[in-house]
Image: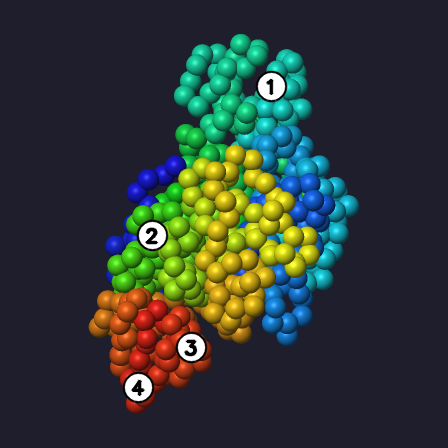
Amino acid sequence: MAAALSLSACSSESGGPSSAKTEIETKANPKLYRNFYEIFTGSFADSNGDGQGDLNGVTAHLDYLNTGDPKSTKDLKVQGLWMTPIFASPSYHGYDVTDYQAINPKLGTMADFDKLIAQAKKRKIAVILDLVLNHTSSEHPWFKKALAGDKKYLSYYNWSDSPKKGYSLASNGKYYESEFDKGMPDLDLSNPDVKAEIKKITKFWLDKGAAGFRLDAVAYYYNNSETKTENFTNWLVSTVHEQNPDAYVVGEDWSDSVVIAEMSRKSDINSLFNFPMSFNNSAGALQNALLMQDGSSFARMTAEWDKNLHKANPAAIDAPFLANHDMNRAVNFTYNLEKSKMAAQTYLLLPGNPFIYYGEELGISGSGIDQNKRLPLPWGINNPANTKESVAVPGATESVTTIGGTVEEQEANPNSLLNWYKKVLRIKLRYPEIAQSRISKVDVDNSSISALNYGKKYTIISNFDSKASISLKLTSQMKQKIAERLSVTGAYITLDEKKLTLPPYSTVILD
Ligand code: CA
């Protein structure tokens, strides 16, 4: 994995207030702005009591994500769903595929998938599928045929006659590239036959109603060439967009901000996850803002990143997130309810498509081995398809804990983290410009304060101090009227004669 992650490494320009002249217009497809939710498919919800989360379990709980009724107060109002791999695979996680056009029988059937898509469409939830193309499973028929000496399939993979770093010994006496694991042979993505297979796979799922793809391990497509990786990603993205111009493609390029911006420029991909801002990065902007109570640096770094990303690719949609299935849970960084709420309102109100990792909205914990980061969602005993006791993640050494109880308990508690996520996501939907605007920092004479202008429409100001209330005078660069208040402690945000008073951990939207 890449080291030296930094949000500001892209440019030495200051993040000062930008004039209209330097403002970068977004050229993104406006249909692709959505608030997303990531599900670890095998752990989310078990529909038939076999201890395994499944597609019907997801379908049974779609109302939790979005009922489809704009007036409903019970859902999270997310509009996009990323499911970790659902294709045939021998592992519990599915990141080693044996058949790209079959549903993993542990998760259900193709008919279950069709039902899920139909129900999601009713609720206007776009479902994107996890596409693992860097490697297949060593159990994939392609690899088995290669081992049996079939020349066509031998050329699907990368071989060496002698031992090499990242290569494993095969039964044919040769070594095959297997950067992640010996059970995951790397595909030769330059092979036209492999590309033809990929084209067939993406078309198959788009025709079945998938709204796009999450690309796994983009940084590993070619281990020794960023250029080849960028070119292949560009081919893949344009192939998908030829098949459906409104398909959404988001990539996992777990790299620093320079590499991510360059990948965005070269590949034309809709989104790349904002790893430098995530909680797994010790120099991350949000983690630092919470730890040091430094809102000013947060505003500077996020505005710089927004500018650099869109300079590289004006059609890019940023994809901020706190943590995913490969990372310690967000609450293992924030620890308490107040800080978790502050983290939520900060990243959910950034431009672009935020990705909530299932259970983050409950403050579910989990760290260390991967299985602990993928624990079952505690629905509570009266929820349909209850999974609290039934889903088992093989090998997990931690059990499920949250800050505030099960879904059922948090739904009933107006102060719960779950209800805070609902509140913030509703605000985000009321002001679509928040997702689509370019941001610029507004200078404020207090390091705890983050002040950002969203295009010409809104100013969002946050107080990162965990204890102190801060008053500041609104300047002419800021909007002047309070549109929304988010105060974690419940203390009131006031505006009196241009003097704005922000209690600890509070955010105000001015228009
Ligand atoms: Ca099941």
Looking at the image, residue 48 sits to the left or right of residue 229; the answer is right
Which amino acid does the dot numbered 1 rest on? Leu
Q: Nearer the viewer, residue 322 or 510?
A: 322
First along the sequence among labels 2 and 4: 2
Label of residue 467 in the image: none
How many discs mark residues in the rendered view? 4
Q: Is residue 336 above or below residue 90?
A: below
Looking at the image, residue 318 sits to the left or right of residue 245; the answer is left
Nearest-to-viewer mark from 3 and 1 = 3
Which of the 4 image quarters holds residue 60?
bottom right
Label 4, residues with CA under 10 Å away: few <14, some 14-19, many ≥20 = few
Which amino acid does the dot numbered 3 rest on? Arg
Nearest-to-viewer mark from 1 and 4 = 4
Which amino acid does the dot numbered 4 rest on? Lys
Return the residue at label 1.
154
First along the sequence among labels 2 and 3: 2
Residue at 42%, 77% in the rendered image:
485
Return the residue at label 4.
498
Q: Residue furthest top?
A: 173
**What is the C-alpha distance between the residues marked 1 and 2?**
42 Å
**What is the C-alpha distance between the residues marked 2 and 4?**
33 Å
Q: Nearer the viewer, residue 120 or 359?
A: 359
Q: Is residue 54 above or below residue 220?
A: below
The picture places residue 317, in percent across and down from the top left corner, at 48, 57
Return the residue at label 3.
485
Q: Nearer the viewer, residue 199 or 370?
A: 370
Label 2, residues with CA under 10 Å away: few <14, some 14-19, many ≥20 = some
Return the residue at label 2.
284
The picture places residue 301, in percent across and down from the top left corner, at 31, 58
The picture places residue 331, in percent across and down from the top left corner, at 42, 54
